[in-house]
Image (cartoon, rainbow, N blue to C red):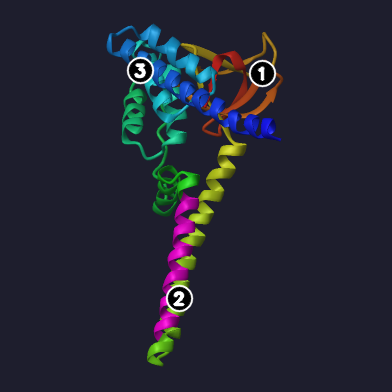
């Protein structure tokens, strides 16, 4: 029994130093990547950041700096890809949005969209500013505040003998509307991220084809940095993509950088 207890207590002692060491190695590697970037050795920075990514040690800071390194190498496609990946993790980070606005100037394919209806524009802004995990936390916080406030009203009513039913109904209605809005935004955002997969064109230019076959009829040409929606895949070779809904065709997956 004593031996078993010793083993049980020893395992955490062995695991925690390993976890700390792993965290230390990750931080050290990340700092090396930053140092290489500052020294203008962008190829080394890309190599280090990609190695961290391959190990599953990702964060918006990693994607953001990897995008920066690619941009400095003049590779606009991968730069946009990783800035977009960073934005998924940190949609409210202004530096990411700024870099993407700069990258927009380098895109060859430009589409002028009609002005969006104000309500839709506001809703889209809400989606971009509130990641799902933040919306869920806000809903939890509001439910907690609602419970505390209603409890306070009830306690005050008992002590004073006065009813606050009207104020309570109003308060519940306001909280219900806000909570429902946050829930709708978070659910819609989660659905889009799960079912809608976007990608960026990585090559200088690539033809989108009428069917998934070499020699198929070219439908239109897209250039590096253009963002497309992946509608369908055929194995690891082909993808059916759409570009602003009206342009649809097939392209090899090797030409795409998935977001």
Q: Which residue is mark 2?
A: 151
181 lies above or below 216: below
Say whether disc 3 or disc 1 marks the residue closer to the N-terminus: 3
Instruction: Estimate the x, y position of residue 232 in percent, counting from the top left.
Output: 67, 28
* Residue 238, numbered circle: 1
Q: Main secondary structure of the magenta part?
A: helix
Q: Nearer the viewer, mark 3 or mark 1?
A: 3
Residue 240 at x, y = what percent? 64, 25
Q: Which residue is mark 3?
A: 31
**Location of residue 127 with respect to 74 vertically, above or below:** below
Label 1 packing within 10 angstroms: few (<14), some (14-19), many (20+): some
- Identified at 50% across, 52% down, the residue is 136
Question: Gap in Å between the C-alphas at discs 3 and 1?
Answer: 37 Å
Near mark 2 (Cα within 10 A), the count class, few <14, some 14-19 or many ≥20, is few
- Distance Cα–Cα, label 2 vs label 3: 50 Å
Q: Verify whether residue 223 appears in magenta.
A: no
N-terminal label among 2 and 3: 3
For the residues labelled 2 and 1, the Cα–Cα distance comes to 59 Å
| Residue found at the far left of this picture | 39
Circle 2 or circle 1, nearest the eye: 2
Based on the picture, tell me whether residue 151 belongs to the magenta stretch: yes
């Amino acid at each position: 029994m004593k031996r078993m207890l010793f083993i049980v207590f020893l395992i955490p002692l062995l695991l925690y130093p390993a976890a700390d060491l792993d965290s230390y190695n990750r931080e050290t590697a990340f700092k090396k990547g930053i140092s290489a970037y500052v020294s203008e050795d962008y190829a080394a920075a890309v190599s280090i950041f990609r190695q961290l990514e391959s190990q599953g040690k990702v964060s918006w800071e990693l994607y953001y700096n990897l995008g920066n390194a690619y941009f400095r190498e003049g590779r606009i496609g991968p730069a946009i890809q990783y800035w977009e990946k960073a934005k998924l993790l940190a949609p409210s980070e202004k530096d990411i949005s700024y870099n993407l606005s700069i990258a927009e100037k380098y895109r060859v394919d430009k589409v002028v969209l009609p002005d969006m209806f104000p309500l839709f524009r506001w809703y889209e802004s809400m989606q971009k500013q509130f990641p799902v995990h933040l919306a869920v936390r806000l809903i939890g916080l509001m439910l907690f505040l609602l419970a505390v406030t209603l409890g306070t009203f009830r306690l005050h009513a008992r002590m004073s003998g006065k009813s606050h039913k009207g104020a309570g109904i109003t308060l519940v209605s306001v909280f219900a509307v806000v909570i429902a809005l946050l829930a709708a935004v978070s659910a819609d955002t989660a659905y889009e991220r799960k079912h809608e997969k976007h990608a960026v064109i990585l090559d200088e230019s690539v033809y989108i084809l009428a069917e998934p076959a070499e020699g198929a009829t070219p439908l239109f040409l897209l250039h590096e940095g253009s963002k497309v929606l992946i509608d369908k895949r055929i194995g690891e070779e082909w993808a059916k993509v759409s570009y602003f809904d009206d342009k649809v065709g097939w392209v090899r997956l090797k030409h795409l950088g998935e977001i």
